[in-house]
Amino acid sequence: MDSFKEQLVARKSDNSVFIKKSCVLIAALFLSAILFILFRYLSFILIAMIGFGTYYLIKNFDVEYEYICTNGELDVDKIIAKSRRKRLTTVDIKGANDFGRLSEANINKEYSVIDASSGETENSYYIACKDPKFGMCYVIISPNEDILEIIKTYLPRSIRR
């Protein structure tokens, strides 16, 4: 029987994102003021270009993750500004080494970490697996009940909880 579920998870904005957006905005205003003082007539075109660049940079801080679980494989994509998609990893759930809640994890420092969670530790899970690009890694996700049920179905018997 084929199984297919997908979920979209928005990354929670924390203080660091707010500070980064503020720094970009302050730098744009400062640069615009300097350009206005130096090049009075040409500055309107340059300020418009700076405004467009600022808008583009600030929108890039809006990040979502999409989990697509299909027949024992979990695809994790990063969606930036609701316009660009980047495949982070594909996890073969049948070949996972460990699985569990992130709050109960014993993280091995030698493993790479792919964080594709919402930013809340209490709703996050980890999957320890081998990735062709990252080697041994932890994939941190925030799945809903449907995705979690499919993942548990395909986990090896030795790590099923």
Image: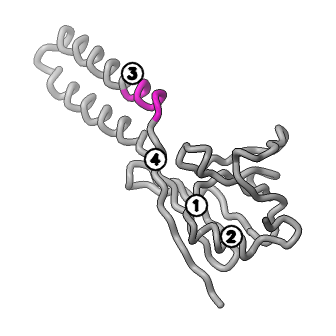
Report which residue position mark 1 lands on.
Answer: 143
**Which mark identifies residue 151?**
2
Q: Are marks 2 and 4 in contact (CB under 8 Å)?
A: no
Q: How is the image coloured?
A: one colour
Q: Secondary structure at mark 1?
A: loop
Task: State the CA–CA distance, disc 3 to disc 2.
Answer: 40 Å
Q: Quadrant of residue 26?
A: top left
Q: Are marks 1 and 2 in contact (CB under 8 Å)?
A: yes
- Number of marks in the rendered image: 4
Percent x, y of residue 93: 74, 68
Report which residue position mark 4 lands on.
Answer: 63
Task: State the CA–CA distance, disc 2 to disc 4.
Answer: 24 Å
Q: Mark 4 belongs to which amino acid?
A: Val
Q: Is residue 60 left or right of residue 78?
A: left
Mark 1 or mark 2: name the one nearer the start of the chain. 1
Report whether residue 132 is seen: no
Q: Secondary structure at mark 3?
A: helix
Q: Residues within 10 Å of mark 1 (few under 14, many from 20)?
A: many
Task: State the CA–CA distance, disc 1 to disc 4.
Answer: 16 Å
Q: Quadrant of residue 143?
A: bottom right
Q: Is residue 55 left or right of residue 125?
A: left
**Which mark identifies residue 23?**
3
Query: Which of the two marks, 1 or 4, is nearer to us in this view?
Result: 1
Mark 1 or mark 4: name the one nearer the start of the chain. 4
